[in-house]
Image (spheres, helix red, strand yellow):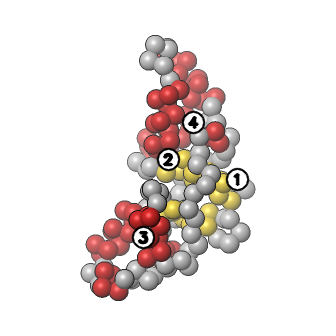
Amino acid sequence: MNLLSPISSIMTTNLKVLSPESSISAAAKIFDENKIHHIPVVEDGKLIGIISKSDYLFFRRGFLDQNIDKSLEDMRLHNYQVKYIMTKGMAKMNPEDRINVALEVFKENLFHAIPIIEEDGTLVGIVTPLDIIKHLANDKTATNEY
C-alpha cells in the first residue's frame, strides 16, 4: 500500500450510524460506549450529515443548565434530535479516491473525518487522519511514493 492506494484500503467500514430523528442522548451513548468521535447520519442508507463529539459537547454545554435537575437534563437530551446539530456540508470521498487526496482534504480544511460514499450517496466507510497515520506508520515506503 502507498498514498496512491484507494481510500477504501484504509477506511473504517464497521460504522455506528444514527438517523436524523435519533436523540442527542443516543449519540452520547454511542460516543461513550465506542470511543469514537464522529457518527454519520443516514437516511435510507444515504449519508445526510455527520455529528462529531465536539458538536455534541458544544450543544450540551449551551443547552444544559447546571441548576437543572439531572432527570430534566436527561429528558431534554432524549427529546432533542440529531438533525438539529449535525453538520450537513461536509467533505465526502468515493472508495476509489486515493489516500493522498484525503491527506490534502485534511490538510486544507478543518475536517477530522471524511465519510466515504458510493456514487448514489450510500455510506460505505469513514476515514480519519489517524487512519492515514496508521497507514504511514505501517508502510515505510508510503512517504517515498507521495
- Percent across and percent down for residue 131 are 39, 66
Q: Kindly identify which residue carries mark 1.
A: 43
Q: Earlier in the sequence, mark 2 or mark 4?
A: 4
The label shown at residue 125 is none
Q: Nearer the viewer, mark 2 or mark 3?
A: 3
Q: Earlier in the sequence, mark 1 or mark 4?
A: 4
Residue wearing tag 2? 52
Q: Earlier in the sequence, mark 4 or mark 3?
A: 4
Q: Nearer the viewer, mark 4 or mark 3?
A: 3
Mark 3 and mark 1: Cα distance apart in space? 28 Å
* Relative height, residue 84 to residue 13 (above, below): above
Task: Report the residue at 33% width, 68% height from top.
Answer: 134
Amino acid type assigned to the residue bearing label 3 in the image: Leu
Q: Residue at x 38, y 69 (%)?
A: 132
> Dot 2, crowdedness within 10 Å: few (<14), some or many (≥20)?
many
Q: Secondary structure at mark 4?
A: helix
